[in-house]
Amino acid sequence: MSDLGMVIVGAGETGARAAVELRTAGWNGPITLIGKEPLAPYERPPLSKFTLISEEEPKPATILDEVRLSEHNIGWIPNNQVVGIDRVNHSVELSNGQQIRYERLLLATGAAPRKLTIEGSDTTGLLYLRTFADAVALRTRFQPGKHIAVIGAGFIGLEVAASARELGCSVTVIEVGPRILMRGVPEEIARIVEARHRMAGVRFKLGISIQGIMNTSEGHLITLADGTDIPCDTVVVGIGAIPETSLAAQSGLTIENGIYTDEYLATSDNDIFAAGDCCSFPHKLYGGRRIRLEAWRNAQDQGTHVAHNMLGASKPFVDIPWFWSDQYDQTLQVTGLPDSGVLTVCRHLSERDKLYFHLSGENRLVAASAVGLNAKIAKDIRLAEMLIHQNQAVLDPIALQNTEVKLKSLVNA
Amino acid sequence: MQELLQWVEACEADAIDEEDVIRFDHGDRTFAIYRTAKGSYYATDGYCTHEKFHLSEGLVMGTIIECPKHNGRFDYTTGAAKRTPVCVDLRTYPVKLEHNKVFIQI
């Protein structure tokens, strides 16, 4: 390879992990990590939880501080966006006008919160959560006794709702879908999560759309389709995320529910890779089904993985999807793709701790999901992930239900 | 400040399954004690160095302990951090077996 460098667009989880891994894997040339935020790469999972509720002033959970950046000789450029890619000359142009040439380019641009637009409504004062600065803004609003309306009952919305309740706010969650967590988890789990929120005092408005939002002297007034008015101090919107594909699209790369990559995370240009929330990729263990994940571990795993392929390794990415969500004292975890299963069996670990296995028509394990105390479910979900990784092991549904059968005994059996 | 080390009885040798881990609390400190598939014993600090989750609830694979929360990994025989998000090594403690009991030096 020439003396051109590795350039990474996006200094989030994926970009940071890729930068370190490129160095660890032996790349001696320049590495440039370009981020649009002023902060060094930090972990996002605490933003909806610890950052909101901690008694002390929150600090970002930094992944790569300036010491580690310099130890690894990674050139970090904050407060900048890449505004153009010159694919012929292998160079990117930054918002400050600087041009940087690349040997290989990684797009780790992430995703942005989907914005709520309602005709005739003023939605300018609504809050979203993606960055540390967003979390700090929420935190200052979450004073005891304030009424917080959360629009969207996905993971972000529910974690924010739980944090707001823990801070003594009153909370109403509004969701247009018929139930919470429509996209994320099976109905059995959603029901348990909803019950926990209701126990904590959260009010739900499910299966109803919003007719309008007005700014008032105290905050906002939300009017639902049935005419119900919900006055509140603050509105937080969590209605999903949209992959950041504009740079890739304007550069002529293929887009398909995110930046299109092959199983090696290479885009339609062999010298440009994409990883993390921004890309869709085919998963071999799911029959080449094309998926896009918005999950912390995937961001980390793909960042680490893609570094090797940028250096020429040509290894397909086959890690099993996994994510978790913490709400109150309860955690839920999902591994695999539950919607690719046709049969669900439950292992009742205890009154509170439930583990569900999702099987294909041939009794292959394609996913597992669980809700309960972290200590009770985490190990089993991890073992389930290993079983899925074993080419979706064929398993006996009866044995899966039986708590006497240790899951570890099924791995590599 | 110099630490005064002492041998403390932690558990019966067969209180830990092969290739598994248990929690051991002593005073205000907490530890994780491991048994390999071949019957050797090891001890480390109880909490992961990333966030405060107890490793005794994690999965033992060979000489690796995986944190139950974010899947960070350590080699529990050396304490070495092996997989992100952990980047700080885990402290380890000497272990001895006497009269079928596990002692750790802390």
Image (spheres, coloured by chain):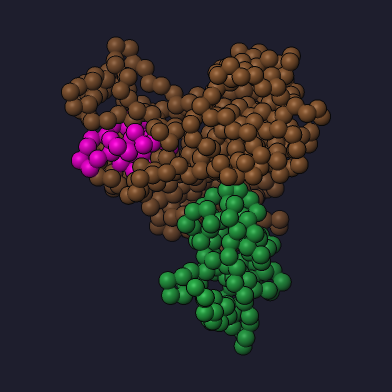
Residue at 38 percent across and 21 percent down: it is A116
| Quarter of the rendering containing residue A72 | top right
Residue A222 lies, in percent from the top left, at 25, 24
Residue A23 is left or right of residue A367, and the answer is: right
The hue of chain B in the figure is green
Residue A207 is left or right of residue A309, and the answer is: left
Residue at 71 percent across and 16 percent down: it is A87
Judging by colour alone, the chain drawn in brown in this rendered image is A
Residue A50 lies, in percent from the top left, at 40, 46
| Quarter of the rendering containing residue A317 | top right
Q: Which residues are magenta?
A: A135-164
Along the viewing direction, whichever of A94 and A332 lies nearer the viewer: A94
| Residue at the limit of the structure toward the front, as seen here | B1
A290 drawn magenta: no
Along the viewing direction, whichever of A192 and A203 lies nearer the viewer: A203
Residue at 43 percent across and 46 percent down: it is A326
| Residue at the limit of the structure toward the right, as seen here | A1
Q: From the image, which quarter does the N terminus of chain A lie in?
A: top right
- Residue A353 in sight here: no
| Residue at the limit of the structure toward the left, as seen here | A217
A137 drawn magenta: yes
State whether residue B93 is above or below residue A360.
below
Q: From the image, which quarter does the C terminus of chain A lie in?
A: bottom right
State whether residue A115 is above or below residue A38.
above
State whether residue A51 is above or below residue B25.
above
Along the viewing direction, whichever of A311 and A38 lies nearer the viewer: A38
Along the viewing direction, whichever of A48 and B19 lies nearer the viewer: A48
Residue B37 lies, in percent from the top left, at 69, 69
Residue at 48 percent across and 44 percent down: it is A61
- Residue A114 in sight here: yes
Residue A177 lies, in percent from the top left, at 38, 28
